[in-house]
Image: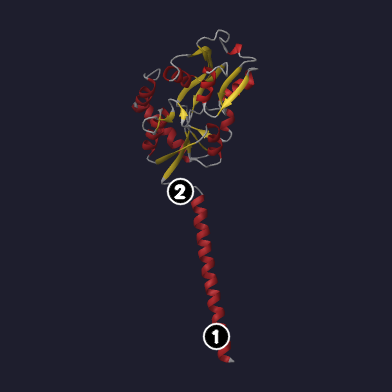
Amino acid sequence: MKKIGLSILLGIMVAVLVACGGNNDANSNANDTANSNSGGGDKDTYVVATDNGYVPFEYIDEESGDLIGFDIDLIEALAEEVGVEIEFETLEFDGIVAGISSGKFDIAIAGMTITEEREKSIDFTDPYYEAGLILAVTDDNDEIQSIDDVDGKTVATRTGSTSETYLKENTDAKVEAFPQIIEGYQNVLAGRADAVLYDLPNVLFYSEKEADNKLVTVGEKLTGEDYGIAFPKDSELRDQFNDALQTLKENGTYDDIYEEWFGERPEGT
């Protein structure tokens, strides 16, 4: 009986020790997981959310299949200046703000206008590009000469863009929004929409490079809009990239990238 009792006692002690060790391992794993999700440490690579259909800012080169554009070259130069590695993830424009505000992505650059509404959920750098909205129609359209002429007309634009907001808040046009703005241009050229409203640089680029100038701008530039690079709220990266942006503007790197994509140096340089 004593031998049996001793065996039982030893078995209980071993079981307790194993259980304690297992709990320590579990606690250690839990702490490791918590630390890895806390965002407190530096990452090896930061994820940049962007678009792939906004010429000439970010788009897929038809020959190489590479993601190229003004925004792409700029963010790569900024990352090099900051001293971090980045990788790109492309998605529809209207999902980028939600992805940044939720912390799914570390950085976003996609020709994104800085607005008060967006600043409620994400942080921006200082502006890196001054844009604005412009209305465009086919070259044989004599009915629409400005934004004042679009009431009751079908106007194409891009889903989630400031141009969509502008049309809904300032006109009585029939707004048709598309995930990719190229669909809006194509609908105008095919006669399925009367006009398109979008960011000036993209409209001009598409008209010249893709539409053989059959798409023309009308009226004045609407609104003054600044593009900014976006980050989750309170991200330490924002200030680092802001400082890098200032450095690139001072040392001429920004101007070089600008000239490569727009054929001229920025005004005032």
At label 2, counting other C-alpha atoms closer than 10 Å, the crowd grade (few under 14, some 14-19, many 20 or more) is: few
Q: Position of residue 193 (x, y in %)?
A: 57, 18
Q: Position of residue 192 (x, y in %)?
A: 57, 19
Secondary element under disc 2, as helix, strand or loop, is loop
Compared to 218, does 123 lie above or below? below
Q: On the rendered image, what quadrant is the N terminus found in?
A: bottom right
Mark 1 = which residue? Answer: 7
Amino acid found under the numbered disc labelled 1: Ser
Real-space Cα distance between discs 1 and 2? 49 Å
Q: Marks 1 and 2: CB-CB under 8 Å?
A: no
Mark 2 = which residue? Answer: 41
Side of 247 where 190 appears, left or right: right
Q: On the rendered image, what quadrant is the C terminus found in?
A: top left
Secondary element under disc 1, as helix, strand or loop, is helix
- 38 or 46: which is nearer to us? 46
Residue drawn at x 52%, y 54% as measured from the top left: 34
Residue farthest toward the top in the current orientation of the protein: 142
Amino acid found under the numbered disc labelled 2: Gly
Display coloring: secondary structure
At label 1, counting other C-alpha atoms closer than 10 Å, the crowd grade (few under 14, some 14-19, many 20 or more) is: few
> In the rendered structure, which disc, 1 or 2, sits on the residue that comes first in sequence?
1
Compared to 132, does 30 lie above or below? below
Q: State the count of labels.
A: 2
